[in-house]
Amino acid sequence: MNNWQRILSVARRELRIIRNRPLYFMGSIGVIAFCAIFFLTFLDHGLPDDIPIGVVDEDYSTTSRNFCQQLDATQLGKVVHYDSFSSAREDMTSGKIAGVCVIPAGMNEDIQAFRQPKITFYVNGLYFVSGALAWKDLLTMVNLTNGAVQREVLRAKGFNDSQIMGMIRPIDIDTHQIGNVTTNYNYYLSGILLPGVLEMIVILVLIYSLGAELKFGTSRHLMDTSGHSIVTALAGKLLVWTVVFSAIGFVLVMLLYHWLHFPISGSIFNMFIAMFLMILASEAIAIFILEMLPVPRLALSIGALYSVLGFSLSGFTLPLEAMPPYIQGLASAFPLRHYYLFYVQEVIFGAGFAGWWKEVIYLLMFLFVPLIDLNRLKKAYIHQNFPKE
Amino acid sequence: MAKEGFIKTWLRDWWDIFCHELKQIFSDGGVLLIFFVAGLAYPLLYNLVYLNGILSDTPIAVVDDADCSDSRRFIREIDATREVEVAAKCVNMAEAEQLMKDRKVNGIVYFPRDFGEKLARNETAKLSLYADMSSFLYYKNAMIATNFVMLHEIGQIQMERYSLAGMTEQEASQVIKPLGYEDNNPFNRAFNYSFFLISAILMIIIQQTMFYGMSLLVGTQRERNHSFASLPDKLEGHGMVRVVLGRGGAYWLLYLGIGMYIAFIVPAIFGIPQRGQFGDVLAMLLFFITDCVFFSMTWSTLITRRESVFLLFLAMSPICLFLTGCSWPTVAFPGFWKAFSYIFPSTFGVQGYINLSTAGGDISAAGSQMRIMILQTIIYFGAACGCIFAENWVIRHKEEIREKRDALAKRAGIDKAEDARIIAGK
């Protein structure tokens, strides 16, 4: 038997193992399918709307009613009326409403008489997205009300509408959101969270697959099948798993950027490359963890602790620059971080090869990590001299 | 031996099961790793990752085609904000775009050629902001900085224009700002990322580590052909309650310690606000831990092998985080997922903890959450007893189930002997 045939017979053996244990199917395709359905339907709206904002109207005037109606009519906000500030504040503290807006008594009169009344508003920044959006919505409404009053005054003074625009709004900003025009949270979060889940799956399933040989004591037979070469054994097993994971990864990329039309300025084929490299790098990490600690149960726990951290350290929510320097360095040890940087270049900027070639090199460097001590795994496979579970 | 009273027997059984479970926990390296390394070190690690929590001085590039005093003042004022730092002044957009692609800057502010002229002509002058959306915090910073500077500038320019239109300074200032505002963000003044996220992660760590640890043990016992329900088997199907309470007591005791460390000591180390009354938070925490114990006990029944819990349920951790509503608001949940979120104690534990400890509300601020947790506890207690009952049934019908399984495998065309030969060489 030559080496290629040995690899194929290890691969055939691996397929039998997968067929025998439904856990492999559930742990890979089952988990990613559930997560994809979850995140893509959960964030389907893109941006939350009708966030409840409490209003305590102590004025009861046409202006205050108008203000409430306008606030209610914004896409972001939905007005909930309260009689007293204390009950509104209680509801804000318990997270039922995102913010409270207090309209002072006599506001209408004060505006008419230019006594400059003040609207006071409070938001709950601990419910992050709703708090920030309520804050933005209230701020916009106050500024719009200001503009409306100014327009009335200027009209009374005899200015025409085009002059008034220049007076009310001397400067305007037009904002271009590069890569995500509509501030869509689904594009933003699912685009990284789902590959992150895949990274997790690759690491865990592969550690389990390699560790199960030790756990069930089948590793000697594996070595027999592979002609006592650890490289052949790994090649055979990895052949199967790389095909499975890549298939999942490619479907994921197709799902996001083709079927669901997530915006992408570059090419979807380059994202296939990114996905494939991330999968390979994660496989390398899995092998590394198991060869350093050929005790399946501990290796799997460590793999779990490692892969959970990947989400935070990829820096796609809180950017890496805001983390302490020693954590920033640590982030490079996660394939998801490099996938994210690749994604920024390809999906957001469409920079192509010139933008992401470095990430390709970093991801390929992961492949050398298992070579540090493959012999250790081989010895463990042959002697089975580590605790089995 | 004289027959002992029911209560005495009950208590002795309970004590035996309780001690047995504690022994199991402390003799299993994997479980200890999850409980003590993950449970104790992860809160610290996450705090380090989110130590600053605020992104300041996001670098942006400026392209000033207008080159007038107004645009220069605008640029100086943007640079002075906390949110943004002018990292580069570029001669044209191409250069700025290249800097953005190189990730040297995360935003571009562009002043068109006619910016100054339009201001002089009393028209609306437009400037453009290009924000990098690779992280929404970059966008938020660039937005806030330019908008605040714009509002400030507008005030100044309006003063000039209104004076030109013949108003006195007093009149002008009244017309410019007929309605003032005062914004407060009492619990999280600067929209600090760590305050809400850490509070949520801490409670999730309690629930998830408990679930993973317990599942590891259940899986191990099943692999060794013991069962976590073997004791009632001796009692011929009676005594489900003492098994549930005995095992639960062991975890409850451990997590009383770990939970108090996570809920009180960790935030104190890292300066996460602890505005709540100690007693209130502790009461909430006890409800939460009790809930988590029965929750874990129920769901860990699904675990047949030691390692399978990570393969199947590790991805639930980020999902639980989203279901708490601390980032994506609960009102925006699709109906199905809202119902789904009621499965997890963490949904309410996190909200309760944020409302009580981080926001400093009194116990009523977590009232509805605590009521749901009590309801969950009752349901999961019943479910945990039911699982013990089911487990006993399975143990008693082991042979039949195996036969059925083999028959199913045969029908699906799986030859187990052949598989065993190929996999293990036997």
Image (spheres, rainbow, N blue to C red):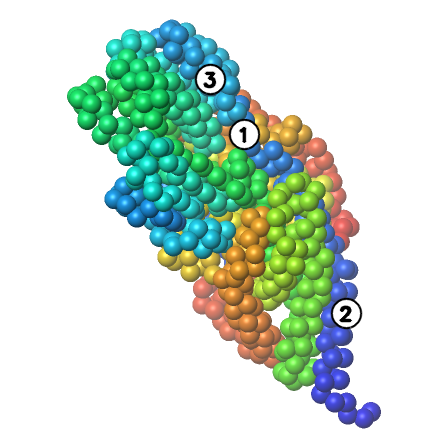
Three-letter amino acid code of the residue under disc 3: Glu
Pair 2/1: label in front: 1
Pair 3/2: label in front: 3
Please, which residue is most extreme toward the right here?
A: B1
Q: x, y percentage for residue B170?
A: 35, 22
Numbered label attached to residue B77: 3
Residue A87, visible in the rendered structure: yes
**Which quadrant of the figure contains the C terminus of chain A?**
bottom right
Distance from Cα at disc 3 to Cα at disc 2: 67 Å
First reached walking from the N terminus: tag 2 or tag 1 = 2
Q: Is residue A92 above or below residue A243?
A: below
Q: Are marks 3 and 2 in contact (CB under 8 Å)?
A: no
Q: In this view, does B335 lie to the left or right of A204?
A: left
**A232 and B291: which is toward the camera:** B291
Distance from Cα at disc 2 to Cα at disc 1: 49 Å
First reached walking from the N terminus: tag 3 or tag 1 = 1
Pair 3/1: label in front: 3
How packed mark 1 is, by other alpha carbons closer than 10 Å (few <14, some 14-19, many 20 or more), is: many
Which image quarter: residue A326? top right
Three-letter amino acid code of the residue under disc 2: Cys
At 50% from the left edge and 28% from the top edge, which residue is drawn? A341
Numbered label attached to residue B55: 1
Disc 3: host chain: B
Which image quarter: residue A163? top left
First reached walking from the N terminus: tag 3 or tag 2 = 2
- Residue bearing the label numbered 2: B19
Q: x, y percentage for residue B423?
A: 60, 55
Q: In this view, does A325 lie to the left or right of A344?
A: right
